[in-house]
Amino acid sequence: MDKEYLAKRLLSGLPIMVYDFDGREEEIDMVFYGGSVSWKSIYTLRKDAGGLICYVTGKEEGQKLGLNLITDELRNYQKYSRLVKRPVYGDEPAFAMWVNHMSTRTGISDEDRAKTILELHKTIEMLQIDEKEAKEKFFNEFMAPGHVPVLLSRGLNKRRGHTELTSSLMEFLGLKKSVVIAEMLDERYSMKRQKAEIYAKNNDIPLITGKDILEVLKVA
């Protein structure tokens, strides 16, 4: 894995693709760095990937902003607690909140979602400087519900989904835990790995596996 090449690619606004694991979701996600997203990135995600476009950061970062995993929140309400169940692949979802930035119009356009994501990235950056100010920015400048789902990584020691793989990869590359992901879909079903590999080759996009990430991070 070429660390410098991947970091430069992501910072320049170009995507990578990440496959999780055989026997898990067996899913390929297209990934952009949160600080380099543009409306064209969102257009590419919805046109060429097609899955739900989500913003990813770490659980610690989320908690500093006052965010918890939605599964934990729902458990606290008897009315909704029975809805919390494990998917067939075993891990609980990583969703925390759905937001729009207050400067957006409807929140769903490519331009609006890019704006929301860029402001989320700025908020994560601000955490290193002033946690209180970052939290104020989040609650003052965002509204919920919105059109950008925020996912929080539990860490690879607890969960090995794309949320954890991509946020851990960013940390390895020396970047903020701030990415945008969307699953690659095909007609009727998720895109098979073989077809995704052809897409990656034809479009000169690096395809990284969960196994590759675990190896470079030396995670058993």
Image (cartoon, rainbow, N blue to C red):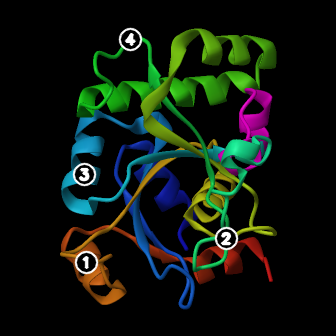
Dot 3 corresponds to which residue? 46
Side of 196 where 23 appears, left or right: right
Q: Quadrant of the N terminus?
A: bottom right
- In-front residue for pair 179/106: 106
Q: Which residue is mark 2?
A: 91
Q: Name the side, left or right, on which 46 lies relative to 209.
A: left
Q: Earlier in the sequence, mark 2 or mark 1?
A: 2
Three-letter residue code for mark 2: Asp
Q: Are marks 2 and 3 in contact (CB under 8 Å)?
A: no
Q: Position of residue 13 (x, y in %)?
A: 36, 44
Question: Label 3: how many residues lie within 10 Å, few (<14), some (14-19) or many (20+)?
Answer: some
Please tell me how many numbered marks the rendered image carries.
4
Labelled disc at residue 103: 4
Q: Residues within 10 Å of mark 4 (few under 14, many from 20)?
A: few
Question: Of the numbered discs in the image, which one, if any, rests on residue 159?
Answer: none
Q: Is residue 79 magenta?
A: no
**Mark 1: secondary structure:** helix
